[in-house]
Amino acid sequence: MEETALKKGHPKGLYFLFFTEMWERFSYYGMRAIFMLFMTKVLLMQDADASQIYGSYTGLVYLTPLLGGYLCDKFLGNRRSIVIGGLLMALGQFLMFLSASTGGGSSAVTIMWAGLTAIIVGNGFFKPNISTMVGQLYPAGDRRIDSAFTIFYMGINLGAFFSPLVCGSMDFRWGFLSACFGMIISLICFVIYKNKYLISEEGKEIGLPVKRLDFKNILVIAGSIGIIFFMLNFKQLFKSDIDIISYFIYGAIILLPIIILSDKSLTLTERNRIIVIFILAFFVIFFWGAFEQAGASLTLFADRQTNRSVLGWEMPASYFQSINPLAVICLAPVLTIIWGYLYKKRMEPSSPKKMAFGLTFVALGYVVIAFAVKGLGIGDKVSMWWLISLYIIHSIGELCLSPIGLSMVSKLAPLRLSSLMMGTWFLANAAANKFAGTLSALIPPTGDMDPATVIVYPSFAGFQITNLYEFFMLFIIMTGISAGILFILSSWLQKMMNEKHDEFQPELDR
């Protein structure tokens, strides 16, 4: 057995990246927890419009890692990319604070677009590089990498747990400013301690070499900022119903695999591994499309049709978004123990099967909430425990899929394309989040309504959605079918991953 497979514990750099990512996620999830409520309550947008904006924003957040990954690989290096991204995201959160401070109106919307643009581009530089550096801390073939990404994922969720409680407990403007402070803390810590902790176990600095960034690529960055700001403003500027962001995101997810797989320098093994990444990325779209309703339709459901009264105190709707990260923090060690036990018994499921389990648990979560809302009237409310149960079940599914997916990309991607392939993985999240916004727009009218209001029910694939039961059934069918197909394909995908590589069939301790 290789020595790398026997090492115990984790390098200090993992916990440094844990802390850095924790505060960045505090910033992102704090803003996300109140974003839908800000648009519907302060900017007075319709649910469907706010849902589409939410989907466009979160979709582009996961698309720009492609640009950030490319510039990192070719020019900037991981460390400089993270600093640039952190500065842009802090600026974006501050602009959201300014937008909320105006009290509404067209100026608030324009400032909001500017803030979203800065956050989107900044995230593109930050997110793929921080995840890639986790994988670079370990030598090839080290099976600790799976548990490392699970630990790293707990850092993400620790920040995501506190942020809705902080940002959701105050006025919207102070909530956005708190998110800004979280990003600044993350950035300062990274700048001060990066040289001390970001080293491999052999003592080498991790991160790709930095090359000079030429004027052409500076124009690419500036042009990308301008294009994203234009796309976010397109409907407002031209009074158009055309959603160009959908074309942009879905077009990218079709074209990128073609471009990457056409690279003649790829070996057969590298090509097979990349194909596995793309196939699993397709199924990830359905997982996150259902899961990310947490920040969209489920937030509206929590606000309007969930009984949030606790001993005479009404809990803010945004607090429900802390349930998922808290459950992940509590359950991640349990899942790690389970996978370790099954590994020793030679029964550990393959990465594709784990991800199929993830889709199954998301479907089960919606079964619970569909049961709760069956026969529910427009103005009726359900116990908060139904929604809490959904989030806990979804958290189990997330642990089966998300850290496993990050680890898989780190192991399968060729080193020279590591950041780009991590960005490609986030591209599937981009399509999923845009899809989530589209699905959220299908939520039927809920909450207290004026009796004189003419109710218009949304339609999907020719079927009219007239109540929440039908709305949640859509997610049960979508994720249930996806899980079944992935289970069927999992053995074939595992063969594509295993070809002549022992790290996917590790030798057991004796």
Image (cartoon, rainbow, N blue to C red):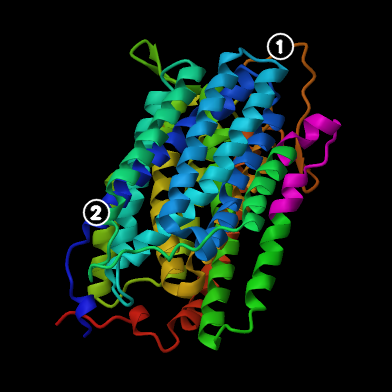
Mark in front: 1 vs 2? 2
- Residue situated furthest left in the rendering: 510
Q: Which residue is mark 1?
A: 450
Q: Is residue 418 above or below residue 251?
A: below
Q: Residue at x 46, y 23 (%)?
A: 177
Lower position in the chain sequence, tag 1 or tag 2: 2
Q: Are marks 1 and 2 in contact (CB under 8 Å)?
A: no
Q: Indicate the amino acid at tag 1.
A: Asp
**Local crowd at mark 2 within 10 Å, few (<14), some, or many (≥20)?**
few
Specify the quadrant of the image occupied by residue 305.
top right
Q: Position of residue 215 (x, y in %)?
A: 64, 55
* Secondary structure category for the residue under label 2: helix
Q: Is residue 397 in view from this perspective?
A: no
Instruction: Please check the rendered image and state whether residue 78 is part of the magenta-colored stretch, yes or no.
Output: no
Q: Indicate the amino acid at tag 2.
A: Lys
In the image, the segment drawn in magenta is 231-249
Q: Position of residue 172 (x, y in %)?
A: 51, 19
How far apart marks 1 and 2 lie (CA) works out to 61 Å
Q: Is residue 395 left or right of residue 71?
A: left
Q: Is residue 344 in view from this perspective?
A: yes
**Local crowd at mark 1 within 10 Å, few (<14), some, or many (≥20)?**
few
Q: Position of residue 149 (x, y in %)?
A: 34, 59
Q: Residue at x 66, y 53 (%)?
A: 220
Foreground residue among 373 and 434 = 434
Q: Is residue 438 left or right of residue 29?
A: right
Q: Is residue 239 left or right of residue 47?
A: right
In the drawing, what numbered circle is on residue 196?
Answer: 2
Q: Residue at x 45, y 73 (%)?
A: 415
- The quarter in which the N terminus is drawn is bottom left
Q: Position of residue 161 (x, y in %)?
A: 36, 36
